[in-house]
Amino acid sequence: MTNIRKIELRFPNLTEFEQKENSFLFKLLSQLDNVKIEGDTVVAGNTDLNPTVLFRKSQINNPEISFIIQNQDDQFWKTGDLLVGFNLPDNKEGLIARKNIEHRQLSDNVGNYVQLRIGNENYYTLTIEQLFSRLDKKLKNLNHVGANFGPDILPEPDYLSMKKLIAKRCNIYRYPTGEE
């Protein structure tokens, strides 16, 4: 069996907002014992048992997740605005159009937060500065990465195809009950 050797998490780095977010993320990750910074990439892990995890600032429209596997044909799926696949080449521009996302810094009696407006939908999250201040100097290392993919975010045939390919190369866990 050929295991997943790398998991590459690619983040858009086109706008001032994205660059600021990435700057705080990289600053936080750089504190970990098992990472190194290589230009626009943070490399974490690197053991024989676990894949290396790469966090990369990229000139792309939307986030991407690429599972790097030898002897595997390129294949990808679109889950909303997230591109997921095997051995994605750099800058797969044009596969997903960039959405107009409005970012607003807001605050209330609890503190600061961000409102993301995509079309008519509003989403609320902590600012990256808040996340950084909560985790600053509290993390030691990164030993695995997880992602939740279910049949509700992909058409069922695509989900089953992706799940089958991933299951051949790593453990899949059904949250919260355990290994599948």
Image (cartoon, helix red, strand yellow):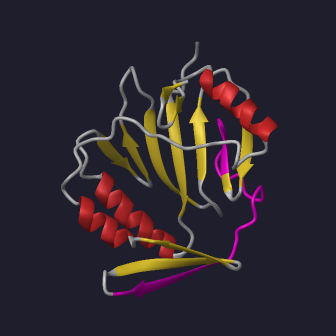
Left or right side of 73 for 126: left
Q: Is residue 95 magenta?
A: yes
The span picked out in magenta is 83-108
Q: Is residue 179 above or below residue 85?
A: above
Quadrant housing the C terminus: top right
Residue at horizontal 20%, vertical 53%?
Answer: 138
The residue furthest front is 177
Whether residue 68 is visible here, answered yes or no, is yes
Depicted 129 relative to depicted 43: above or below: below
Q: Is residue 14 left or right of residue 96?
A: left
Measured from the top left, where is residue 136 in percent x and y? 22, 60
Q: Is residue 45 above or below residue 100?
A: above
Q: Quadrant of the N terminus?
A: top right
Does residue 84 appear left or right of residue 108 in this picture? right
Image coordinates for residue 171, horizontal then vertical, percent: 51, 24
Q: Is residue 60 magenta?
A: no
In the rendered image, is residue 74 in sight? Answer: no
The residue that appears at 73% across and 44% down in the rendered structure is 77
Give percent across and percent down for residue 18: 50, 70
Question: Image point 53% across, 24% down: which residue?
Answer: 170
User: Which residue is more in the foreground, 11 or 38?
Assistant: 11
Give how far across and how far down residue 157 sits, in percent.
Answer: 81, 36
Relative side of 32 to 168, left or right: left
- Residue 67 picture quarter: top right
Out of 151 and 117, give the one closest to the viewer: 151
Residue at the image point whose x is 30% and y is 57% from the top:
28
Number of labelled discs? 0
- Residue furthest to the left in view is 137
Residue sitting at the far top: 1
Q: Quadrant of residue 132?
A: bottom left
